[in-house]
Amino acid sequence: MLSKKTVEALNKQLNNEIYSAYLYLSMSARSTFIGLKGFANWFMVQYREETVHAMKIYDYINNQGGLVKLMAIAQPPTEFGTPLDMFEKTLEHEKFITNCINDLVNLAIEENDHATNIFLQWYITEQIEEEANDNEIIFKLKLVGKEGNGLFMIDKELAARVFMPPPTSQGSEA
Ligand code: OFO
């Protein structure tokens, strides 16, 4: 049983996760446009992961007897600057999402809602991984600078990323 406030907050986070998917899909399109197929692949995998994050919340609200309310999805940017800029924007967005998850956990604790608190722990762990992945790629991009060969190598590395649905996703990939 979820409180009205929690349902509202979870619906907001559902929208945030769908926006994340949309943002990374736009980054994937931009990467394809500038010929960085590996980057495009990385962001496409990220897009798919975000749909899982969204659908886990969708399922949770439904399973707890709440009403899912879909909201308008904001238009993501289409220009992101250099590949380094793009990953810095990714990290910035993920830090925003981490804060949103922390706020949700605070609300669950405030409301003595143990089920929602436990549900959200998966997202806490996931956000650590999301930020670590972005930081690692930012580090490499800074290392190679504007050097074409280095960028080519990173693009090749990012091309190898494969989408793997998380075991706790209840098979909810969109
Ligand atoms: Fe859903 O973790 Fe990124 O946004």
Image (tube, helix red, strand yellow):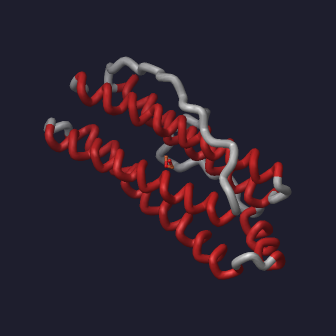
Rendered residue at 47%/22% (across/down): 71
Image quadrant where one finds the C terminus: top right
Image location (x, y in percent) of residue 79:
69, 48
Where 172 falls versus 46 (above or below)?
above
Rendered residue at 51%/23% (across/down): 72
Where 35 falls versus 173 (above or below)?
below
Image location (x, y in percent) of residue 146:
75, 76
The residue sitting at the bottom extreme is 143
Rendered residue at 32%/32% (across/down): 9
Q: How many marks?
A: 0
Residue nearer the viewer, 99 or 146 = 146
Image quadrant where one finds the N terminus: top left
Residue nearer the viewer, 162 or 82 = 82
Where 91 falls versus 102 (above or below)?
below
Image location (x, y in percent) of residue 154:
74, 71
Image location (x, y in percent) of residue 97:
42, 48
Instruction: Say whether residue 17 is left or right of residue 157.
Output: left
Where 23 falls versus 130 (above or below)?
above
> To which quarter of the image does residue 76 belong?
top right
> To which quarter of the image does residue 90 belong?
bottom right
Rendered residue at 22%/25% (across/down): 3
